[in-house]
Image: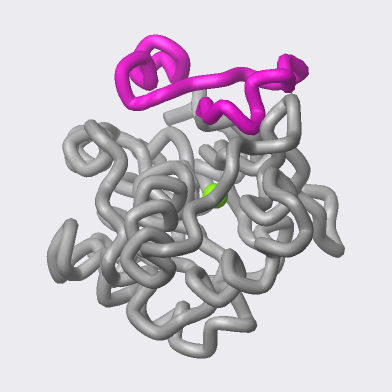
Amino acid sequence: MYSQPFSIRLYIEILDPWHLECYLDFMKKSKIILIDMDGVIADFRKGFFEQYKERFPDEPLPEPISDPAQFYIEDNYPVEFKEAIQQVYRSPGFFIKLPPIEGSLEALEEMSQSENEIFICTSPILENPGSAQEKLAWVFKQLGESWRRKVIITKDKTLVKGDILIDDKPEIKGVCKASWQQFLYEQDYNKHITDRPRLNWKNWKEVLNI
Ligand SMILES: [Mg+2]
């Protein structure tokens, strides 16, 4: 007892047994890990190309014009395709139909068995009014009821407290200095970024060391 820091001794001395158990349980959880959805667990790119083809079968997209690939899909194609591209991912039903990224669902289940707290942290697309609801529905469909309680939907991820954020976006801006460290989920549009750790669903355990 005397080797424990003062704050822990204080908690142990003032808490009733139930709260003490909760507190000690919390202390055992070593990290809060936030996991983005699009491009990390939901395959935005693959779903987009499938749905674009269905919607515009006679207007196929040309070869991308941007090298390196850009994060926003429309930035990879001539400007005359911009409206059609945006129409696809701003339409009702777009998000719920996205396929999962291979290995992501298994990785999340496995990660949730570790001593860490896992949350899905995702931004809605405001021009697609149903996107927040569809994202919740996607999590329920792909991962089940218990995961729906683990979803944080926000336009500003810097406001969310955590130790690690797994996200594919090259630049994440917000009003706060983020408390988390970003681990970049590897995609072709971020392969030029090497200033932070990179991972995928094959090597995540080694990279995160959990
Ligand atoms: Mg993303």
Q: Residue at x 15, y 70 (%)?
A: 145
Q: Position of residue 103 (x, y in %)?
A: 23, 32
Q: Classify the position of the N terminus by image quarter.
A: top left
Q: Is residue 98 above or below residue 183?
A: below
- Residue 163 visible? The answer is no
Question: Magenta span has 187?
Answer: yes
Q: Is residue 119 above or below residue 137?
A: above
Q: Residue at x 62, y 55 (%)?
A: 161
Picture quadrant where residue 165 is located = top right
Left or right of 107, for residue 71? right
Q: Magenta residues? A: 186-210
- Counting labels gives 0
Question: Magenta span has 165?
Answer: no
Q: Position of residue 112 (x, y in %)?
A: 24, 42
Secondary structure predominantly adopted by residues drawn in magenta? loop
Q: Residue at x 17, y 36 (%)?
A: 106
Picture quadrant where residue 17 is located = bottom left
Residue placed most toward the observer, 58 or 147: 58
Q: Residue at x 31, y 59 (%)?
A: 98
Left or right of 82, for residue 15? left
**Colour style of the rendered protein structure:** one colour
The residue most toward the bottom is 129
Q: Position of residue 33 (x, y in %)?
A: 46, 42
